[in-house]
Image (tube, grey):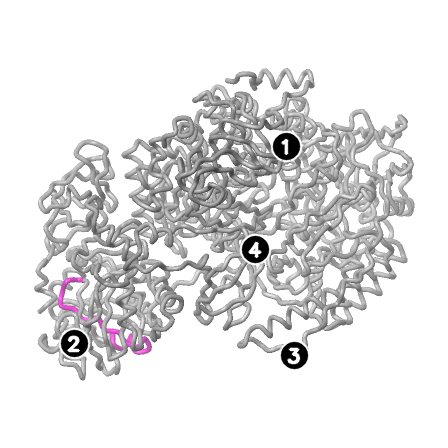
Amino acid sequence: MAKHGYTYSAGKLLKHGLSSGAWPRMWRRPEARSSYDVAIIGGGLHGLATAYYLAKEHGITNVAVLDKGYLGGGGSGRNTAIVRSNYLTPEGVAFYDRSLDLYNTMAQDLNLNVMFSRRGHLTLAHTDSALRTMHWRAEVNKLQGIDSSVIDEHEVKKQAPSLDTSKDTRYPILGALYHPPGGIVRHDAVVWGYARAADHLGVHLLQETEVLDILCEDGEGPEGKGAGGRVTGVRTNRGDISAPAVVNCTAGWASLLSNMAGVTLPITTHPLQAAVTEPCKVFLPTVVVSGSLHVYVSQTDRGELVFGASVDPVGTYRVNGTLEFTEELAGHVLELMPGISKMRLLRQWSGLCDMTPDYSPVMGTTQVDGYFVDVGWGTYGFKAGPVAGETMAETIATGRDADLIAPFHISRFTEGDLVGEKGAAAVGH
Amino acid sequence: MIVVPCPNCGPRNSSDLRPCGEITSRPDPATASLSEWRTYLYLRENPAGWVTETWYCRSGCRRYFTIERNTATNEIRDSEVS
Amino acid sequence: MSNLRLPERPGEVIDRGTPLSFTWNGKSFTGHRGDTIASALTANGVEVFARSMKYKRKRGIMTADHWDPNLFVQVGDEPNVRAGSRRLEAGMQVSAQNVWPNLNFDVGTANQVVGRFLSSGFYYKTFMRPKWFWHNVYQRVLRKFAPGGRIHWETSTHGAYDKRYAHPDVLVAGGGPAGMAAAVSAAEADAKVMLVEHEPELGGHLRWGDADDLAALAELRSAVDAHPNIEVLLDSTVTGRYDHNWVAVMQRSHDIAPERLVKARVGSLVVAPGLIERPYVFSGNDTPGVMLSGAARRLINLWAVKPGSKAVVLSANPEGDAVIADLEAAGVEIVAALDARAGDDIAEVKGSGRVSKVVLGDGRTVDADLVVTATGWTAPTSLLNMAGDRPVYDPSAARYFPNQVPDNVLATGGITGNGSTAELAAHGTATGTLAANRALRLRHARRAAASRARSPEGPRPEVLEDTRTPLARVPHPECYLSSGANAKKGMVDYSEDVAAKDLVQAAGEGFDSIELMKRYTTVTMGPTQGKLETVNAAAVLAKARQMEMVDIGTTVWRPPYAPISLGALAGRIFEPVRRSALQDWHDAHGAAPLLAGQWVRPDHYGDPMGEALNVRENVGIIDVTPLGKLDLRGPDVTKLLELVYVNKWQKLDIGRVRYGTMVAEDGVVSDDGVTGRLGEDHYLMTTTSSGAGAVWEMLEDYLQTYRPEWDVHVTAVTGGLTSINVAGPKSRELLLRLVDGVDLSPEAFPYFNVRRGTVAGVEDCIIWRIGFTGELSYEVHVPSGHALHVWEALLANGEDLGIKPFGVESQRILRLEKGHYIVGQDTDGLTKAPSAGLGGLVKLDKPDTLGLPELKAAYERTDLPVLVAVQPDDPQLVPTEADQIVDGDSNRILGRITSSRMSPTLGRSVCLGQVDPSLAAAGTSVTILLVDGRRTTGTVQEHHAHVDPEGVRQNV
């Protein structure tokens, strides 16, 4: 798989176990060059995947991935690791289905077990209008070859016996959108897999390297930034790096970085919180999502329940979390599964989500030549990571927006049409 | 649960209010171009620092008012009725 | 089983007169009131409490407190109970968890043999081929190894949990000497104080100390007890500090609730948690019989339990030195007293199931069954972290110290330095005074800030400068990793079975920052959340990277400080439902309940088709109270209506009603309804049920922030007026019998008009003639207190007319027959006004209306979808709502069915749908893909209305 990689296998595990020999590094800590063909800001899943596909599919290996902290320290390491492709719009379905394909073969492609667990994904409907939306999604999905259907409450009970499917609850479960290929992935492993593979192809992963400015010329704004101009590189805490292509693959800081290139984004930043319980013996086999109750839950192979919700209402860059999130979460989880009151919440955390008006990303070229964006991922960036990397790499390599991401171009906010995922994505995990 | 100072009701838990985001300036709809209009609708400064934003005292006096809040620290300065 | 209970100890907390029986793995045991589960079992000679997660190694008591990673047990249906802190109760059924088949023999011990292959992250490197193997075999095996107890979801129920709000000026987290002193001085400075202690009694480490400690404790405790301004919460934990000093306390000592969440808005938070003793990393450090000095002292002094018989002690501090006297007093033989400050060390401990031999640093091997270490402290800085602090490591004192905290958080006690009891208390006293000053200044400012709030008493207190003398930092050797040759086999994370060598390996693979290392090895991710492990992990990483501890940092401590049950977080579950004044009647008369948004409504009374037909033939009444209703008054209401509706409102005469559609600023249809003019400056607006709140807030928004000069007053009257729609050809005849003061003749009261009058003797009802059902109909808005009377009068007086109540389902049938769309069902988040078929309703020549530029742009487009009526060519086939309209046999989507029903009036199925404009012309045949995969055809109709498109019936 790699130019100078080290292949993992059961045999290697045996060899290292017997010899107690050290395993090689997964990636280097390289010295930064003064110029690269492509500088990618953000060492998370999206940035690393973009770098990997640039190198692998397009032969562009003089690439740097810059991160102000450590690899995968942002949204990639804070999400709840759910993947699915049962979106509402044909654009969304096509895009996320490609991503699911890439997840499916990722362990083999990257030679790292990302522990993809295709355990099935239930989106519960508590009202007849929710049920109608589930039907809508199922029908759109089926037309695009996605395994997706509406099931009734009895079938829901079979899939997830701990759910309360009785009728006399405040939010009775009337049915669910069932998506068998959906599941969970070990999110950190995906980051490491791409990091290792990109490193082996020659990409420089520059951790603890913070971008302080994006350097531009000939734009209509101050310092040559803004529409009509082009990028020339980035200024970092470790010095200037010149690059004819700069890619913004950040979440949480996308607006701030984009402003450095003179490109204002249609984004407000909100925290998305998550929490995990102490482990218990495994009893929940599928991923369960309830839009009405603003909660999603899955149980890891380690026995922890992992919870998420919708984004916090107050926009902030704070990631220290709130108490009310845990209170509402617990109340809603116990509406669904009244028998688990005695489980204990172990840890809560928070990540930053860049929300766009239509719950769809902003991707591709911009009004500044050489400045590319892969931002505005709201709460669904993890699911899209692989395909975002693949399509962004194509866009950077060819200079033209890849077909799959054309609907997500920034120009839709000033002309053209927004994408219609908003209705389905409010708690779209 | 931050405390938001409503100019009428005094300090209140933020759950009593609704955050309405950065203040915006509505262009004259009769003359605004579509692109000016959409800048008003969609584009936001979204700073990591002080921002002037609107809150609605949903469970109290039902006034809209603005405060300055630091989005990096959640520190809040004075409030005034819109 | 042996009895290891000692003769009475001066500070013991057990009540020897009250024996308690309980079972452990099915066998009966006896302890005393005041015992923890662990102390009672240890007194009975139990040495092994659990098996480790990965290698299934036997584990014994180690810290004998809440943080003990080896004491997780199942109690009845409650998993993961901390036996180190949970008080013993009579009848408890305690069992080991995570063992198979049992504690003494676990087949998972096979992992110990193959352990060398299970290096950290091993699972990332294998089980990739063949692909099915991972999913079908290995993942299932891995799940079997999930640690933790069993949740009995089938039988457990949500208990009597509760919550409380509190507003103390000062909250002190930690009831040790510094915390108690801080509470007293804050209270003396007139602050309202809440003192929270994790253990069941105040005192902190003084409780298991010597006679002097006990005397000091008694004095401090009586000072706390004497002060009326102090509320003490014992057996309670401060679990989180959030922005603006919102502090969560989990109280386990409440009389009724098993756990109560106290939410406190705190003026000043005083953080005084003391210190947590740190384990020492050496080979065999997880063998039962290896424990920390605090555990030994607590066992002996609190519960009078002898922890072993032959001990090796390794001490690096005075607290460790003190354990020797306690052990000797308990009759334990000291085999070796090692002084880490003098270079003494433990190289390795041997023994299976219990310590048997100890290899000392000098190479000697001694026989022992107990190893006690006192090698340093971890500062539990969680609450400070949550307040934004990043504590800094001090190598001379071998621990982290607070760095920068906000003014409303103050630290005191051991977390800030060392001192005698008197010195700790003095620092606490100064801190309490300072905390009170800051809190009282804040209280004063808050009261002064709001005119309507309580006004402050007296002047604002002057600023008190922070003149506290910091506690000393006593030098302490850096004892992390033993010098023994096999030290790296020692455990760093007991919960996760992560040894030092695993961390070294991870660092070598590139996981060389503390956060990456944590994620790769899972170190610090277990139930103790790093309280015992984090600093040791950082030390191992520092050594592996040959860096200074200061440069390594630690992982971020996240809330909660200690795990909280979901039940306690949820509290009493409160999910209210709105009910109209008539809902009791509906319930009593067989209505099928329908939950619709906030409301419960009658879906039907048994026969929705028949009830609908009855409206077409006779007369029916429906409770439509959830319809949003806004009373608008003022001279500028017309301007407001012009702004928020797409149509014109200038010439609405008094007594007239008009339909209007609202769009948002992006041109998307957001709500609709009718508004009637009741008087010169008085209107009643109705909105959709689900949009009622949002429309109200939207109106207020534009009135307050955009046109504050407009004089309009908005009052929500949705619940105050009960709305009854009287519909059907005989509705006028019925109302003629009940209405006074209104001329109901068609000439005097035509369609789309409103009148006020008396209905069934109830004055001041509002009646308007509108027609969602397409029939002659009147909507009567009755003051809700009289609603039941009017409803029953209508039924009684309409008996001979064939009156029947009808519900939401019949209304949906009737409106669909009539082709009225529902916002949010027939429109969606992208439906702009032209798509909804609003045609001539929208006026683009207004100077200002919401979304005007978007409306103008939308009306220039020809590619937007169009809402049309569709009739399936098979009249008996009712497509499912959301069935897709496709391009012939292809999978290209050209639209969808948005509403569908069987029409009782026409005896055929009828639909509304959104279609591509190429399909919008009347007579176009469309292909509908059914849920079962079949395709059928339908025909686009000329009008939205399937029944009476000319509107004859409603206009009579």
Name the residue tied to disc 1: C521
- What's the residue at 63%, 28% (across, down)? C510
Q: In the image, what residue occupies the spot 72% across and 49% down? A: C380
Choose mark 4 or mark 3, whichever is in front.
3
Q: Which chain contains the residue that carries disc 3?
A: C
Q: Give the residue type that dot 1 points to.
A: Thr
Q: Tell me where residue C606 sits by quadrant.
A: bottom left
Q: Residue A91: x percent and y percent?
A: 32, 37
Residue at 26 percent of width and 61 percent of height: C672
Q: Is residue C412 left or right of residue C670?
A: right
Q: Is residue C285 above or below residue C39?
A: above
The quarter of the picture where residue C190 lies is bottom right
The residue that mark 2 highlights is C735
Chain at tag 1? C
Label 2 sits on what residue type? Leu
Q: Which residue corresponds to mark 4?
A: A323
Tags 1 and 4 on a common chain:
no
